[in-house]
Image (cartoon, grey):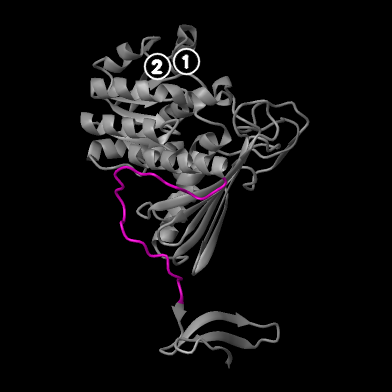
């Protein structure tokens, strides 16, 4: 497939690096930018055959099969509309919209046009995430009870992120969209998110939006999602996930401390995304494009188009994320649990929020099994009828 890029900034270059990094049959051929000089620079850097500052012209070109949107949030809807009009498959960077209403309109556009809408949620394609998600699907940690995702760094690169009108909010819409979808994958995307409790604050920056937020999301099966985001974290980019299940736990450190450490007096240059210094003890990333999920993400998107299947992350997923974030912003204002409003929910419709209890035998539930420092094995049991809690020594 021939790919056209809408946008020439920071994320467009990450996407382009992923698209041209390996020999492949899919090829980046053209770019649009609102600034023609930047479009030319991007085209020169990636040896593209065409560049323009006319979005409709680029999208409607007959040699373009697929469009990648890497534009500011407030321009996503117009770009998707152009792709739908031209019947071109479209992949859109996160978040899909500034709010759920925008995201739903974009979802409807691609489905009515009969084109694929792929949601470019790269952190749901990292090697560590994909292996963790498979382990959960295979039952390695039992039923997921709680999933937490954290992203924190010193703040985004471009000016429009800091303008709530263009971006749709602050750190929560920028980073929380990652965290919400990560936890949603771990808990199960077929499980409906019910309500959200959220705190936000503007702690450091002179902006009309939040630079820090923490939220809790209740799911219909009793599981809890949690996100922590900040533009106030100093020292690089902190990406961590934790998942707790009835049979195990997963901890992921995705970026800041991954086993690659280097000391430098400052003679070098770029270290890693959001790194604040090039001197002292540094934490580089071996293959940043791959470790952040871009390679796996585009492979999944291209395969889905060819095979006429849903990608792992679709416009529908982007819409659900926006709906959850809408509830989070509402909760931050009211201080109450706020319902997640979803139009056209496509997952499970039943609730199962009872405790994930385990039976020991016909008469007892198992509360806990442990080995004491003395070597003694002990069971703590609860009688199913009387409710009596007893201790039983074994072995």
Mark 2 neighbour density, 10 Å: few (under 14) some (14–19) many (20 or more): many
Q: Position of residue 71 (x, y in %)?
A: 45, 22
Residue at the spot of label 2 = 31
The residue closer to the viewer here, 140 or 224, is 224
Q: Earlier in the sequence, mark 1 or mark 2?
A: 2
Mark 1 neighbour density, 10 Å: few (under 14) some (14–19) many (20 or more): many
67 inside magenta stretch:
no
Q: In this picture, which residue range is highlighted in magenta?
A: 335-357
Asked if the residue under mark 2 is in contact with the one under mark 1, i.e. CB atoms within 8 Å, the reply is yes
Q: Quadrant of the N terminus?
A: top left
Residue most toward the top? Answer: 37
Does residue 172 lie above or below 135 as drawn?
above
Q: Quadrant of the C terminus?
A: bottom right
Residue at the spot of label 1 = 42
The residue at 26%/24% (across/down) is 84
Q: Position of residue 271 (x, y in %)?
A: 65, 32
């Amino acid at each position: 497939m021939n790919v056209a890029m809408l946008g020439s900034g920071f994320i467009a270059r990450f996407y382009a690096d992923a698209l041209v990094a390996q020999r492949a049959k899919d090829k980046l051929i053209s770019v649009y930018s609102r600034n023609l000089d930047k479009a030319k620079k991007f085209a020169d850097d990636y040896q593209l055959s065409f560049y323009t500052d006319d979005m409709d012209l680029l999208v409607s070109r007959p040699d373009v099969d697929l469009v990648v949107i890497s534009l500011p949030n407030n321009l996503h809807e117009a770009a998707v509309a152009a792709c739908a009009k031209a019947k071109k498959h479209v992949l859109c960077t996160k978040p899909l919209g500034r709010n759920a209403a925008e995201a739903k309109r974009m979802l409807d556009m691609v489905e009515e046009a009969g084109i694929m809408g792929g949601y470019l949620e790269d952190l749901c394609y990292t090697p560590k995430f994909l292996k963790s998600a498979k382990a959960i699907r295979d039952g390695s940690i039992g039923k997921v009870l709680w999933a937490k995702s954290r992203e924190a760094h010193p703040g985004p690169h471009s000016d429009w992120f800091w303008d709530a009108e263009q971006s749709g909010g602050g750190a929560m819409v920028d980073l929380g969209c990652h965290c919400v979808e990560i936890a949603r994958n771990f808990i199960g995307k077929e499980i409906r998110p019910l309500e959200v409790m959220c705190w936000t604050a503007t702690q450091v920056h002179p902006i009309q939006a939040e630079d820090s937020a923490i939220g809790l999301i209740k799911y219909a099966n009793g599981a809890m999602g949690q996100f922590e985001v900040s533009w106030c974290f100093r020292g690089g980019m902190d990406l961590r996930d934790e998942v707790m299940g009835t049979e195990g736990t997963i901890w992921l450190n995705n970026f800041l401390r991954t086993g690659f450490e280097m000391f430098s007096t400052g003679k070098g240059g770029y270290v890693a995304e959001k790194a604040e210094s090039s001197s002292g003890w540094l934490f580089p990333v071996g293959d940043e494009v791959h470790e952040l999920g871009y390679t796996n993400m585009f492979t999944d998107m291209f395969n889905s188009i060819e095979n006429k299947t849903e990608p792992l992350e679709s416009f529908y997923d982007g819409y659900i994320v926006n709906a959850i974030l809408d509830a989070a912003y509402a909760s931050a204002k009211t201080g109450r649990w706020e319902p997640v409003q979803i139009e056209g929910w496509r997952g499970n419709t039943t609730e199962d929020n009872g405790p994930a209890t385990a039976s020991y035998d016909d008469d007892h539930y198992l509360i806990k099994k442990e080995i004491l420092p003395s070597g003694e094995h002990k069971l703590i049991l609860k009688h199913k009828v009387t409710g009596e809690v007893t201790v039983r020594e074994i072995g």
